[in-house]
Image: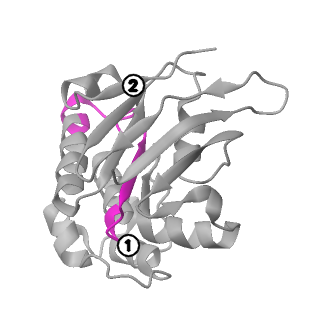
Amino acid sequence: MLFQSENISFAHPGQATMKFPDLALDGGEALLVLGKSGSGKTTFLNLLAGLLSPATGSIQLGEKTYGSLSAQQLDKYRGEEIGIVFQKPHLLAALNVKENLQMAQYFSVKKTQDISSLLGELGLGAKISAAVSTLSEGEAQRVSIARALANHPKLILADEPTASLDDENAEAVIQLLKNQALKIGAVLIIVTHDQRVKKHVENFVEVPVL
């Protein structure tokens, strides 16, 4: 298995402990993590990304177990091996499309994806020098996906990637994520409350509201 999590739990100060399902996924596999607002979906994503530390349990990506890494080592590992697609693209307005992807690659020492080819595959070849302020909502989300893929990650985490998109753009974004994960052999985990996504990713787990 390329990615595994076991016995993960977490509690925000003064709140009940959340327990999350065990995961075991190989490269190219896709999984939905479904749950209503307040169920802890985003907390789970932050744990899987190594942005939060679990109270119990272990998370392993490739040969690395998160708990065995220092904060600095985990930051470096995350930058090289985990691509995160946020609900809002959070692109740097002062940089154009290409420069936003170059920024993602700047600190990586591993082989990265060719930016022109990657943008072409995502239908953004003509936007390589565009200011991000000129992009449509769907285009900005695809640039966000390209940024997450720029370092050839082992794990792609997408947080509500379709929440603000219409049906056509939502389907396009999910297919892009699935196809790219399969192409580079990455694990894809999509955290969402959007039931439309279930039509495109059959494998899912649910996070119940406490």
Could you say which is closer to the camera, residue 129 or residue 69?
Answer: 69
Magenta-drawn stretch contains 154 = yes
Which tag, 2 or 1, sits closer to the chain's start?
1
> In the image, is 35 to the left or to the right of 168?
right
Q: Amino acid at mark 1?
A: Leu
- Within 10 Å of disc 2 (Cα), the crowding (few <14, some 14-19, many 20+) is some
Q: Which-is-in-front pick, marks 2 and 1?
A: 2
Q: Amino acid at mark 2?
A: Val
Q: Position of residue 126 (x, y in %)?
A: 17, 69
Coloration of the structure image: one colour
Q: Which residue is mark 2?
A: 205
Q: Which mark is residue 58?
A: none
Q: Which residue is mark 1?
A: 101
Residue at the image point whose x is 38% and y is 61% from the top: 148
Residue 126 visible in the displayed image: no
Q: Position of residue 27 (x, y in %)?
A: 26, 53
Could you say which is closer to the camera, residue 97 or residue 3?
Answer: 3
> Where is residue 133, by image quadrant?
bottom left
- From which residue to which does the magenta span run? 149-170
Q: Position of residue 103 (x, y in %)?
A: 46, 77
Q: CA distance from mark 2 to mark 1?
A: 31 Å
Residue 47, placed above or below residue 65: above
